[in-house]
Image (cartoon, rainbow, N blue to C red):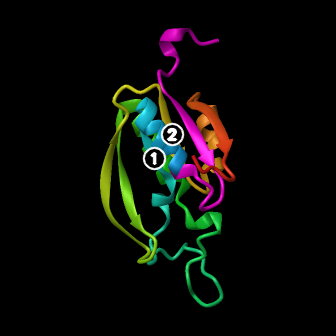
């Protein structure tokens, strides 16, 4: 068993669930109430020019396909935030299928970082194996 000095001082709480379920609302409430920063995992979609972006038969991006999301980049950003206290998070414009910039997210010493998105459950295993998973909730219908 690890001693407390080697335990991470921050944990990641994942909010999983479908679009429109209230994940972002809940995360915003926790940011206001507790100061827990949020990583919006839906900003890690692949760009429209990425040849690995899954497409629907009409050629449009298939945003419901897990392969439309860049898990490795999302995990790397969350790990940076946990380990270094800050991370650069892309700003994704889903209507244009492009990253339009980045934003800096800082943990500001918070004990919990919230990461929310429709594919957030894909981070449970790697975060747990790194000892960074504080919990994972499936949000289905939160109205605050």
Q: In this view, does 119 lie above or below 98?
A: above
Contact? badges 2 and 1 (CB < 8 Å): yes
Q: Is residue 18 magenta?
A: yes
79 magenta-colored: no
Which mark, by number, is residue 121?
Answer: none
Q: Which of 25 and 129 is in front in this view?
A: 25
Instruction: Give the answer, above or below, for where 56 lies relative to 142.
Output: below
User: Could you tell me which secondary element the residue under label 2 belongs to?
Assistant: strand
Q: Name the residue under label 2.
A: 114
Which of the 4 image quarters holds residue 110?
Answer: top left
Determine which residue is flagged by label 1.
39
The quadrant where residue 106 appears = top left
| Residue 61 spot, x, y in % from top left | 56, 78
Instruction: Identify the residue at image location x=55%, y=54%.
Output: 71
Q: Which of 69 and 120 is in front in this view?
A: 120
Q: Is mark 1 on a helix, strand or loop?
A: strand
Residue drawn 51% across the image and 49% down it: 25
Magenta-drawn segment: 1-24
Query: Quadrant of the rendered structure where residue 13 is?
Result: top right
């Amino acid at each position: 068993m690890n001693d407390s000095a080697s335990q991470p001082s921050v944990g990641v709480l994942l909010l999983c669930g479908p679009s429109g379920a209230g994940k972002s609302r809940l995360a915003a409430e926790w940011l206001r109430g507790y100061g827990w920063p949020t990583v919006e995992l839906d900003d890690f979609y692949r760009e429209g020019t990425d040849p690995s972006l899954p497409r629907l038969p009409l050629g449009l991006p298939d945003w419901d396909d897990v392969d439309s999301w860049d898990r490795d980049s999302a995990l790397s950003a969350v790990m940076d935030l946990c380990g270094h206290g800050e991370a650069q998070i892309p700003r994704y414009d889903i209507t244009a299928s492009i990253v339009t910039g980045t934003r800096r997210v800082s943990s500001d010493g918070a004990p919990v970082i919230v990461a929310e998105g429709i594919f957030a459950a894909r981070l449970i295993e790697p975060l747990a194996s790194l000892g960074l998973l504080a919990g994972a909730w499936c949000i289905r219908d939160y109205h605050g």
